[in-house]
Image (cartoon, grey):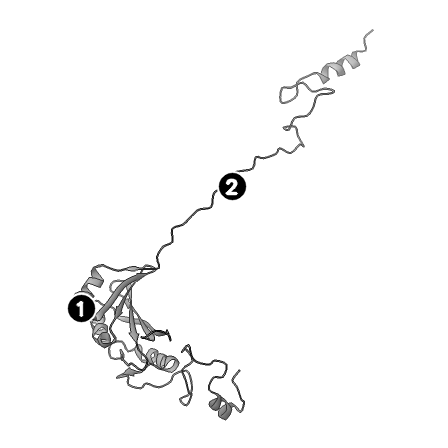
Amino acid sequence: MVDESKASQSSDSLKPDAAGAESGPGTPQTADAPGVPTAKPVAPAKPAATKTPVPVQVPLDNELSRRYRERFGAGILDALEDRKQPYLVIDAAKLAEIGRYSRDEEKFELLEDFTAVDWPRREKRFDLIAILYSFTHNTRLRLKIPLAEGEQAASLVEIWPTANWLEREIFDLFGIVFAGHPNLRRILLPDEWQGHPLRKDYDILQQDTPWVRENLGIESGQ
C-alpha cells in the first residue's frame, strides 16, 4: 500500500510557489525571494556643471542714469550696475547739487546710509558712498564720490538731516572733512583722540598711545 501522507507531502513540494515556480528540494532561491536583498544599480555620475561667470559690475544705461547725465554732464563720471543695484560715480564738486536734485526731482527722500572706503594706494584715496531711498518709487540709488587725501566734501545736512551723525562718523573714523557741517566733531572717540581708526594705515595695535596712557593709566589699549 502507498502511504497517503507521504504521497501528499511529495505532491505539495512540487506545487507552484507564489511566483508561479515550482519549489522543492534542490530548487535555488532567486534574488526576489523573501529575505534576500536585491542589488540596486548604481546611477552614473553626473558631469560637473560649468557656470559662466557673471560680471559683478556692468554699465548702466537706463532712464534714470540718462536723466542724470543730461542734467549734470561731466559731473557724472560713470554709471554702473553692481549686483543689480544702480549707482552713479559723481564729481565731488557736484555732490550738493546732485544731492538736492536727487531729493527734489528724483524723489529720493531718504539718505539711508553714508559711509566711506579707504584705498590708500589710489590717487583718489577715498570713496564716499551715499545710499539713497525713494519712498515714492520704492527704489534705491547709490552715489559714489571719489576724494583725494585732504579734499573736502560738501555737507548734505541741509538736504538730508540724517547726514548730521553719518558725516560725523565718517570724519571720526576716516578724517574726511565736510564743508558746511554745523558741528563736525568726533562722535565715537574722545575729542582728543589722535588718528582715524578706519584708515588702512592706522596702527590698531598701538591706537592712540598718549591718550590711553593719560586717561587709562596703561601703555596700550590692547
Where residue 65 sits in the image (x, y, percent)? 22, 63
Amino acid type at circle 2 is: Ala
Q: From the viewer's perspective, tell me whether residue 35 is left or right of residue 221.
A: right
Separation (CA) of disc 2 from disc 1: 56 Å
Residue 60 against residue 145 in the figure, above or below: above
Query: In this figure, which residue is indicated by the disc labeled 1?
Result: 73
**Marker disc for residue 141:** none
Q: Secondary structure at mark 2?
A: loop
Residue 59 against residue 6 in the figure, above or below: below
Q: Kindly give the residue lying farthest to the bottom in the view shown.
A: 214
Q: From the viewer's perspective, tell me whether residue 15 is left or right of residue 43.
A: right
**Marker disc for residue 45:** 2
1 or 58: which is nearer to us?
A: 58
Residue 170 is drawn in which quadrant?
bottom left
The residue sitting at 64% across, 19% down in the picture is: 21
The residue sitting at 52% across, 38% down in the picture is: 44
Residue 117 is drawn in which quadrant?
bottom left
Where residue 32 sits in the image (x, y, percent)? 63, 28
The residue sitting at 41% across, 90% down in the picture is: 192
Where residue 217 sits in the image (x, y, percent)? 53, 91
